[in-house]
Image: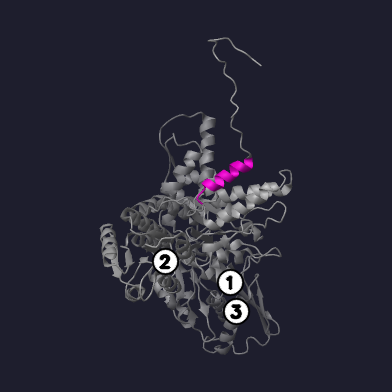
Amino acid sequence: MLFRRKNEPEEERPSLSREVEQTPLQILRQKVEEAQLPERVLKTLHNELEKLEKTDPGVAEYSVGFNYVELVLALPWNKATLYNLDIGRAQTVLNARHYGLREVKERILEFLAAKTLCSKAQQSILIVDDEEIARTNMGHVLRKEGYTCHCAGNGAEALEIMAREDVDLVVTDLKMEQMDGIELLRQINRTNPEIPVIMVTGFATVSSAVDALKQGAAHYLGKPVNLDELRTTVREVLEKKLFVQMGKGPILCFTGPPGTGKTSVGKAIAESLQRKFIRISLAGLRDEAELRGHRRTYVGALPGRIINELRRSEVNNPVFMLDEIDKIGQDFRGDPASALLEILDPEQNVNFTDHYLELPFDLSRIMFIATANDLSRLPAPLLDRMECIEFSGYSDKEKLEIGQQYIVPRQLKVAGLSRFAVRFSDEALMRIINDYTRESGLRNLERQVADVSRKIAMMYLKLGNDSTEQVLIDAATIRKLLGPRKFFRDAAEANPQIGIATGMVWSETGGEIINVEAAMMTGSGKLLLTGSLGEVLRESAQTVLSFLRSNAEQFGIVDNFFMDTDIHIHFPSGAVSKDGPSAGVTVFAALLSLLTKRPARRDVALSGEMTLTGRILPVSGIREKVLAAKRAGVRTILLPYANREVVEALDNDVTDGLQLVLVANVQEIMEHLFIDS
C-alpha cells in the first residue's frame, strides 16, 4: 500500500475509465446508424452487419461483406445536385463552346426550356377534411405559400375534384364519413400513383401511422396540426416530386460522324445545368456484367460501371454520357445492349438492380445522353427508347470559323507559341481544309494545325528567335511545312468518261463520293457486281438493269443487248463494305452512259433510290452528301424531288457554289448528265 505525506500534492494517475478504441466493425455500424438511408437499404445493412459479427475476420467472406457495406454507404442514395435551370446561361455556354450546330442547340434549349417551365408551374393541393375550420386554416396557410388549394369534405368529394382538376398533392384526414382517408389513399394509388398523399388525423397512433405509410402515404401528421410543420412537410414532399419529374425525360442520343462535337456538347449541357458530368465508353463492351456487375458469390466480384461511376460522382443526378453505344459487341457472355434497355427506360430504371448491389437504385434522376455514329447497328427496342439528335458535318465556312476561334489558339498554346505573335491566315486554313483533310468533323484539321504549330515551335528553337513581331502563316508556308497535298478534287479535275458516274453515299464517317464504273463484254447475259456490296445494293443494280431492258427503245438501246453480253458493275474501294438503296440512280447513270456510248459528266453527282418504273424515291443524309460533293469539286447535284423540303432547309454556306436540281424520274436526269445534252 502506498502512503503520502500530509499536504503532499497528489500525483496524476492514469484514468481507469480510459475510452476503449472501437473496432472497424463498430465504426462501420455507427456510420450505418448515422447515414440517412432508405428503410429497405437500412434493413439489408443491419442483416449484413449481424452476419459479420458472427464471422471470423480472418475468413474471406468477412472482407467481402465488409466491402459490400462500405459500398452501399458510399452510394448517393439521397445526395443530389440542386437544379439551376437558366436558359440564358445554357445558351451562352453552348455558343461559347461550339460554333454552328444551330439545330442541335435549338433542340437542347427546347429540352431545357420544358424543364424550366415545369419547375416554375404553380402547384395545386387538395385538402380533404370533414371539419370546415381545419380545411379553412390549412388552406389559408398554404395559399400564402403560393399554392393553389381545393377543399373537399370527404373522400368521395375529393375523387370528384381530382376527376376535373389537376392536383399535385393531397392532404387528407384519416377518419371521415362516406370514404375515409385510407380508402381514398388506395383509390389514388390505383388511379394516380404519382400524386403524393399526406395523412392528417387526431387519432395518431403508431399502428395507424405505420398502416398509412404501408399503404403508400408520403408523410403522416397528427392533430392539432402544427402549421409550421405542415408548411415544411408540404414543401419537402412537393420539392421531392418536382425533383423526380424534372429528372425524368427523353433519353437523348447524339448521332453523326466522328469529330462533330457530340461528346463536347454533352459536357456543355452538364456545365450549363451546373451538374456533374460522367462519361463511359461502351466501344467493344461484350460482357453484360460490366454494366450490371457480378454476383457476390463469384470470387473478385465487383459492381457494374453504372454504380461505380455514381459512387465516384457522389450525386444521384449527374449528366451521364454513354459514348459509342453503337459499337457494343455480343458474344456468349451476354448481350450488353439488352442490359441497356432497363438502364435507359424511364419506366424501369427507377428500380435498377445491380447484380453485386442486389438493391434497387433509382436512376430516373440521371440525364442520360448516348452517342453513336451509325444508328442501324442499334437494336430496335433500344433505339425506340431514345430521342435522336443528328449532328451533321461542318461546311468549309464553319470549319474556317472554328479553326480560327478555337483550334488555332488551342494548338498554339499547346505548342508553347502563345507568347509569340503567330497567326494563321484564312487562306492557310482553307488550304489545310481542302488539301490535307477530307472529313465531316474536325479531328484531322486539329491534327494538321497541331503539326504545323510543332514545326513552327521547332523553327523558333533552332533560330533562337524571341521576337514578338507578328508572324503570318500563309498558304505557301502550309505547303512547305506539310508537303504535297493528300487529297484532290476528284470530280472537278476528272474528264468525262463513258461508263463512269459520280454518286453520293452516306456512311458512319459522314458523306462520301463514289465513282460507279460499268463495263460490257461478250458473254452469256450475266450481271457481275463487285466492290464488297450488300444485298440491298445488289438488288438496286438488278432493278436498274431490268428497267433499261424493258425501256431499251426509249433510250436508244438495242433490244437484245443483254443476250450475248456480260455487264460488270464495280464500286471502287473494294475493301470497304457498301450497302443501301441510294446508289440506284448512280448505277443507272453509269449503265446508260455505257450502253449509249455517251460520256457522263464527272462534276455531276447523283443520289436517290430508283424503282422498277423509273421513279426516284427520297434518301437520307442529304446535308452530308452535299458537303461531300462540294469537297470533291462537284458543281451540279441531282437529288430526289421528294427531298425538296430538306434541300430548301440547307444553309447558304452549304449550297453556295452548287447547282441543286430536284428530279422525280430518271428521264429528267439525262439533260444534266451528258455533255452533249
Mark number, residue 456:
none
- Badge 3: residue crowd in 10 Å (few <14, some 14–19, many ≥20): many
Between 477 and 305, the residue placed more toward the observer is 305
Q: Are marks 1 and 2 in contact (CB under 8 Å)?
A: no
Total numbered circles: 3
Our reading of the magenta stretch's main secondary structure is helix
Residue located beneath label 2 in the image: 658
Label 1 – label 2 distance at C-alpha? 21 Å
Residue at image location 60% in from the left, 79% down from the top: 541
- 222 to 4, vertically: above or below: below
- 366 to 621, vertically: above or below: above
- Badge 1: residue crowd in 10 Å (few <14, some 14–19, many ≥20): many
Residue located beneath label 3 in the image: 541
Q: Amino acid at mark 3?
A: Ala
Label 1 – label 3 distance at C-alpha? 11 Å
Tell whether position 269 is magenta: no
Give the magenta part as a residue range: 24-36
Mark number, residue 516:
1
Between 349 and 397, the residue placed more toward the observer is 349
Q: Quadrant of residue 203?
A: bottom left
On-image quarter of the N terminus: top right
Residue 20 appears anywhere in the view: yes
Q: Position of residue 139 (x, y in %)?
A: 27, 63
Task: Return the disc, 3 or 2, that comes first in the chain's sequence.
Answer: 3
Tag 2 secondary structure: loop
